[in-house]
Image (spheres, rainbow, N blue to C red):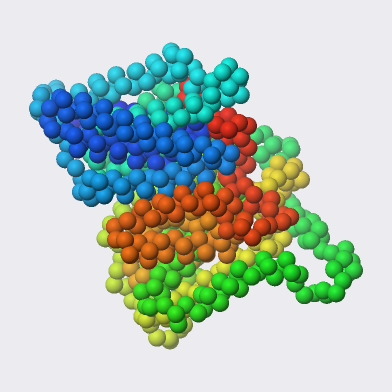
Amino acid sequence: MGLLDAHLVPAVDGVAYGLLLFVVASGLSLAFGTAGVLNLSHGMLYAVGAYTGAELSDGTWGGLLLGLAAGTTAACLVGAGLSAASYPLARRGHLAQALLTFGLALIGGDLLIQFFGADDLPVRVPAALDTSVSLLGHRYPAYRLCFIVMAVLLAAFGTWVLVRTRVGAAVRAAADDPQMLAATGYSPRTVHLGVLAAAGALAGAAGVLGAPIIGPGPGTAETVLMLSLVVVVLGGLRSLWATFFAAIGVGEVQTLGVSVAPGLAPYLLFAAMAAVLVLRSRFAEPATGHGTDGPVRDPLGRLVGRVGAGLRRVMRSARPKTRSASPPGRGRLPSGAAWRRAAPLLVLCVALVALPGLLDAYTISLAGSALALGLLAVSVTVLTGYAGLPTLGQTAPFAVGAYTTANLAAAGWTVGPVQILLSALAAAVFSAVTGPAVIRARSTTVLMITLAVGELTSAAVNQLKSVTGGADGLVGFPATQALWGGEDLFEESELYTYALVVAAVAVAATLLVLRSPAGKLLTGARGAEARMRASGHPVWRYLLVAYIGAGALAGVGGSVMVTVQQYLSPADVGFEIAAFALLAAVIGGTTSVVGALFGAGLIVATRDWVAGAWPGHGPLLLGVLFVAAVYLLPRGLAGLRGTSGEEETTTASPGPRNEPPAVSAPSPAPAPSPVGKAGP
């Protein structure tokens, strides 16, 4: 009984917290399941309602009602704007939508801070609710009990509209059969607009009513988004009841879990999210997932033999039949097309080498940071463009490499090549452990699993203070030596030169592998996975090797970042950096290694150099960059100079692996309904 009394208040808090997440997640589920929009700005919609409600709250019922009406309306209008912005991207898949909405979230977050200030806003509730009541012998805030009732009523009303009304029937039909809906006289575009506006209204209303629970502040949008994604993944899009129970479970972990098991609570949510996604991807895997005869039961030697046979087939097909097949008069010199393809790389090399003589010390240090982010972006390019595995969690091996280098330096291992090799090895081992959970998934599920891996790594960074320094990070470790017995690297130009040499070697090795027969096998697995499997190729092994190699490359980038910056904080390896790396890959063109480096340089220049002329508006400028890149560079910088042949087939669609094409304008594919279809 004493244990029950001790945890009663956190348990009831968990119910209130969970109901708040249920209302928010219902809007996210509605947007994704019906309109087919992976809305990474959904947390910002909640923040719009929370800020508006807090600003209008004056401790009276009139202030609460006015704030509820204003916050709901404002978020509804923002949701309608998101519909107009995302509708033209319907045929480009969820990756473009995710980048667009993340950019809009950065813009919206910056505007909210400029409008309402950078501090957490206090929320004043009506005097009748600003008290406590007796609950089984414990004092409990009256507002939270009232909020539980209001959240239940709001959820019941939304469910009734969705299930029992003609509007709800049209919404469900938009998910199940948009062509039939259009044939009955409904405009799919109007339904798309209405769904995102309704999702925004739900998030806004939850923000106003839930502001005393999750208050308005600079980190509110990201917190709400992450928790809502966990709820949607755990509950799926199959049933609102499943979402309801998932939300209650998440709420209990956030409140009761923290009091019962504070050491495990930070890991539970995203670990559960990853486990559910992995299990769903395994059960959803087609019968031909390992070939035409079901799962492979051959011993390891036979599988290795198949890999060797595949390599030999590709090498034979890549050889010219006769010497006369070469164009006359050119001999072995590269063709004009080859020179044109190599020109950006040559220009980039010349520019990078010349930078120390042209720029000041601060800008040179930014260029070194851009090279580190560029290596991370190249690893994302390998996975997204070549392996077809879009990732939002590549900062996990990046963090492993970074913290390995920092701890090696603190232990006296300051030789640069040693730090690079051990960091790459540690990141490769990490990727080998997490890879099996990722490589069998497809489409948006890959994004969510990698996001969970990244968030679990971030939780570990904050918890393992003896290794990572926790929230304070690491600083004060010895500087790196370029070679054994060499001098420490302190000057910005020396650090930049070191970063440039490491990046050049890593990128050259990556290009050699991607253009080798192994790279052709990887590209073939992305473009024709079913055919590759039917031919006996162990595609999952190819993907695992690519995932491990990309992880090692990210680890090298993390090592370079630590050497250049001489400090390391959790913000350097967080979700925002993962989104930046993915954007850099998209800016360059998802199969362009050189383009990824250009993209990383553009992001660092925007964030740290251009924003310096307009202090405090870095997120706004980055958000504009996200939006502009999605709209203006649908095929990246590589698409501006044109591609042909095999390269064109891989760059034409930067979307997730094997994602089906759209069949109608309103959504990239017939998406699942919140009440009748399976989840992601």
Does residue 281 sit above or below 522 in this rendering? above
- Residue name at image x 29 percent, y 19 percent: 153
- Residue name at image x 52 percent, y 71 percent: 503
Position of 351 with respect to 3 (left or right) is: right
Residue 117 % position (x, y)? 22, 48
Q: Nearer the viewer, residue 388 or 273?
A: 388
Quarter in which the N terminus is drawn: top left
Q: Is residue 63 visible?
A: yes
- Residue name at image x 40 percent, y 22 percent: 241
Residue 385 % position (x, y)? 60, 53
Does residue 335 sit above or below 538 in this rendering? below
Q: Nearer the viewer, residue 518 or 421?
A: 518
Q: Nearer the viewer, residue 179 or 374?
A: 179
Residue 485 % position (x, y)? 43, 86
Q: Nearer the viewer, residue 585 or 131?
A: 585
- Residue name at image x 57 percent, y 50 percent: 634
Total numbered labels placed on residues in the image? 0
Position of 599 with respect to 255 (left or right) is: right
Position of 4 with respect to 622 (left or right) is: left
Which image quadrant is residue 243 in? top left
